[in-house]
Structure formats: C-alpha cells, structure tokens
Image (cartoon, grey):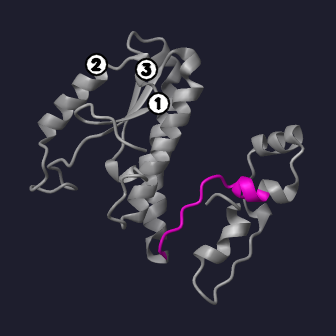
Amino acid sequence: ITGGGLPGNLGRVLPKNADAVLEVRSWEVPRVFAEIQHIGDVSDEEMRKVFNLGVGMVVVVPAEEAVRAMDVLRTNTVAPVKMAEAFADNVAASKERKLVAITSRLGSIELNDGGGMYAYRASKAALNAGWKSLSLDLKSKKIICAVFHPGWVQTDMGGKNAAVTPKDSVAGMSKVIAGLKSSDNGKFYNYDGVALAW
C-alpha cells in the first residue's frame, strides 16, 4: 500500500461497513524510520502516509488466505533475502560474485494479465523488490544480483502439461547465469535469457 499508506488506503481496501483501528504501538518500528524522520524533518502524519506506519510492505488478501499468505511470504520472500544477506560476504569473496533468486513471471506487475493467486504473486513481487534492493546495496562489493523465471515447468506446481521440462529450465538458467555481467545486475530474466518486465 503506497500513496497515502495505511491511513489513506484502509477505506479503499476494507469491505463496506467494516472499520479498523490501528495501534501503532502493536509492532516495533525499525530504528531507521526514526532516523529518516529526524534527518528529513518529516512530520508524524507524513511518516504514516509514506512509510505505512513503519510496517513497510502491506499485502491485502482475502481473509481465508491470510495464514497461507504469511507462510508463502516467509518461504518465497523473507527466506531468500535473509540467505542472501547472510552469505553476501562469502559471495563477494568468490570468483563469480553472483546472487540469483528463482522468482516467477507471476511476480511481474506489468505482465499480470490474469489476476488471482494473490499470495503467490505478492510473494514473488516482493522477492523481486528485495533482490533489486540487494543489487544496489551490494554493488560496492561487485556482486551481480538477478532474478529468474524458470518457465512454466513440468513440476508438481506446473503440471504435466507445462511447456518446459525441468532439464531444459535448469540448463537454460545455468547458461544465462554463467554469462551474467555487471550490466545484468538488478535484472529480471526468463530461463532462456529473455529480459522480463517488472
């Protein structure tokens, strides 16, 4: 939720005749927000609008998907980013200096022409955003960060009618990853090397 943050958007996302009470003290606001507010001389009201009351990212999903959405976000978004942060120094000391995450075309906002799959789409879009930030934050370490859509693969999720075999998906990504250059930092690719829109 952006452009007004939580205070400005609750009325838009809540069902009719529903209301919400926000208790700012219910969660720990990261210290960086206080620093931003102090350095920029930003009012409390503006901080709440711009930074979602210190929550950061907010995903709105149907109530029945809330628990599953949290599990999917932890697996598809938080875990890869935390792993990347934990091993960044090791990667910086390696010969290749590459950090790659497996995302999905379903995480592309521009390419979303089918709707649905709220939790999965949100988790992959968030992963893409996280990896883009890593590409900027780790640039000084000369680490190349890129995300890959493996294709519609014949797996349990993709099904037997999917267009790409696991072998072809892995072979394609391996080839593209091997050829990644510094100019590929922060990019989103299909398994065959075709650039995808965020």
Nearer the observer, disc 1 or disc 2?
Answer: 1
Labels 1 and 2: the sequence-earlier one: 2
Are the residues flagged by discs 2 and 3 in contact, CB closer than 8 Å? no
Q: Is residue 4 above or below residue 132?
A: below
82 lies left or right of 53: left
Secondary element type, mark 3? helix
Q: Nearer the viewer, residue 104 or 80?
A: 104
In front: 111, or 137? 111
The type of residue carrying mark 3 is Ser
Judged left or right of residue 117, residue 20 is right
| C-alpha distance separating marks 1 and 2 | 16 Å
Front residue of 124 and 190: 190
In the figure, is residue 36 to the left or right of 196? right
Q: In terms of secondary structure, where does tag 2 sit?
A: helix
Residue at 76% x, 40% y is 32
| Amino acid at dot 1 | Gly
Could you classify mark 1 by the number of other residues whose Cα lies within 10 Å: few (under 14), some (14-19), or many (20 or more)? many
Within-10-Å neighbours for mark 3: few <14, some 14–19, many 20+: few
Which residue range is magenta in the image?
Answer: 48-62
**Residue with the mark numbered 2:** 178
Residue 183: mark in rendering: 3
Asked whether residue 75 is in view, the answer is no
Q: For residue 71, what is the image quadrant?
A: bottom left
Q: CA distance from mark 1 to mark 3?
A: 8 Å
Q: Which residue is mark 1?
A: 186
Q: Quadrant of the N terminus?
A: bottom right
Give the SS element for disc 1: loop
